[in-house]
Amino acid sequence: MPGSGDTHTRLDAVSRRILTQTCMNDLRAPLGEAHALPNAAYTDPEFLELENARLFAPGWVLAGFGGCIPDAGDGQPVEIAGVPLILVRGRDGQVRGFQNVCPHRGSRLLSEPCAGKSLLTCPYHSWAFDTEGMLRNRPHFFGPEQHQAIKDDSGPNLIPVRTQMWHDLIFVNMSGDAPALDDFLAPVTDRMDGYDMTALRYAGSTSFEVEANWKFAVENYIEPYHVFSLHPRLLSYAPMSVRQPSKIDGHCFYNEYTVPTMEEGRGEGLPHWPGMPEAWQRRGMWFHLFPTLSVEVYADQFTVFHIIPTGPDTTREELHFYLIGDAATSEHYANARQQVFDTWHDLNLEDMDVLKRLQAGRRAPGYNGGSFSPFWDEAPVAFSRLVGEALVVDD
């Protein structure tokens, strides 16, 4: 069984094989001369393993939503950076993350979401852990009918993962040593100053199984160039004349526009953020925090795009919706709320075929990483550059 040193050496070799000096020179070139990541970065299973170890594990990654585990004893299994985790809300209301493994024989502890549990019980030998991750019961541990009830925290306990929340969003840092979450979020929170996040309530979600690498989902999201070609309703809502190329602030990509008129699904029919200035009523903003978190802000909503790599050529894309106050749950707003859900579902459905085509195109060996618009395409090239710089081996 290869050890951690062997794995490190093997991943170094993957990096050198794909992120060659020529590749990195192309990534670092000016926009008119640059190429993006090579085909193998979108098709090679070992490259995804490299990303899990050196891109996702070291930083903050969105893992889940408090609205999905609202009550004490609610838990949800997730996978981050290739590692199975449990998110669970404790008796104190705090959300914690643990590796999803029993410390006895290594069985996966939780396979399905659970609700209202006082103990998380391993299905193999029924070792039981409280919602703070502490071992509490070991049946027959010292022999037949010789059970052990544990009152202290001596363990062995569940393996904790650094977990922190921003409002309802649950983030994890697998390595445990990323900079403060506030620093990671600052490019968004600074630009959202004046929006009262405490007014938001979780309203629901929709999801897609994307037949493409996760990076295509991001690249498609951060470039507005394709709107005129793929999204007729979005184009009528915000025509190309009000759009600008995406802006870049370190690890954050963002954009903003003012729409001519509001419509159902975006800004019309639901309560707006409290105290919102009139000038913001027709403003739309979106942000992408590298590597996988995107959010959009309109007068009546805060929508989160959760991009989850599931394979070198597959991605799960979840959209989670937050509305203002009673709009999230009241029957009075049911139709308008459904319009929000339908608007986002239909819009994202329009991207599915082209994402599949992008993935298929990366099987063409003659493709060299692209030829880019000097006006629209700085963001996708910069995104490729961030991926490459995070994974390249410095010799």
Image (tube, rainbow, N blue to C red):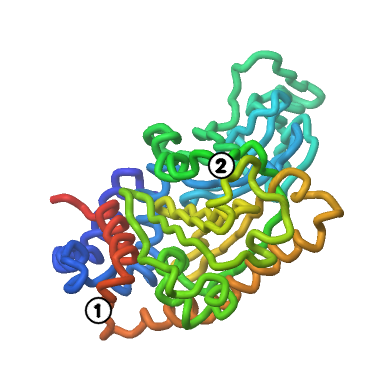
Up-down relation of residue 233 to residue 67 (above or below): below
Q: Amino acid at mark 1?
A: Asn
Q: Amino acid at mark 2?
A: Tyr
First in sequence: mark 1 vs mark 2: 2
* Front-most of residues 3 and 245: 245
Q: Residue at coordinates 73% horizontally, 66% vertically from top-left?
A: 339
Q: Mark 1 — residue?
A: 368
Q: Can residue 63 be spotted in the picture?
A: yes
Position in image of residue 94 (x %, y %): 65, 29
Position in image of residue 141 (x %, y %): 71, 26
- Front tag of 1 and 2: 2
User: Disc 1, disc 2: CB below 8 Å?
Assistant: no
Up-down relation of residue 272 to residue 372 (above or below): above
The residue carrying pointer 1 sits among few (fewer than 14), some (14 to 19) or many (20 or more) residues within 10 Å by Cα, namely some
Q: Mark 2 — residue?
A: 195
- Could you say whether the residue bearing mark 1 is in a helix, strand or loop? loop
Task: Answer with left or right where residue 243 lies relative to residue 168.
Answer: left
Q: Residue furthest right?
A: 331
**Residue 274 position by quadrant:** top right
* Front-most of residues 194 and 42: 194
The residue carrying pointer 2 sits among few (fewer than 14), some (14 to 19) or many (20 or more) residues within 10 Å by Cα, namely some
Up-down relation of residue 340 to residue 322 (above or below): below
Task: Answer with left or right where residue 307 lies relative to residue 299.
Answer: left
Q: Residue furthest front?
A: 278
Position in image of residue 254 (x %, y %): 41, 56
Q: Residue at coordinates 61% horizontally, 68% vertically from top-left?
A: 208
Q: Can residue 109 be spotted in the picture?
A: no
**Residue 104 position by quadrant:** top right
* Front-most of residues 168 and 96: 168
- Could you say whether the residue bearing mark 2 is in a helix, strand or loop? loop
Q: Residues under labels 1 and 2: Cα distance? A: 43 Å
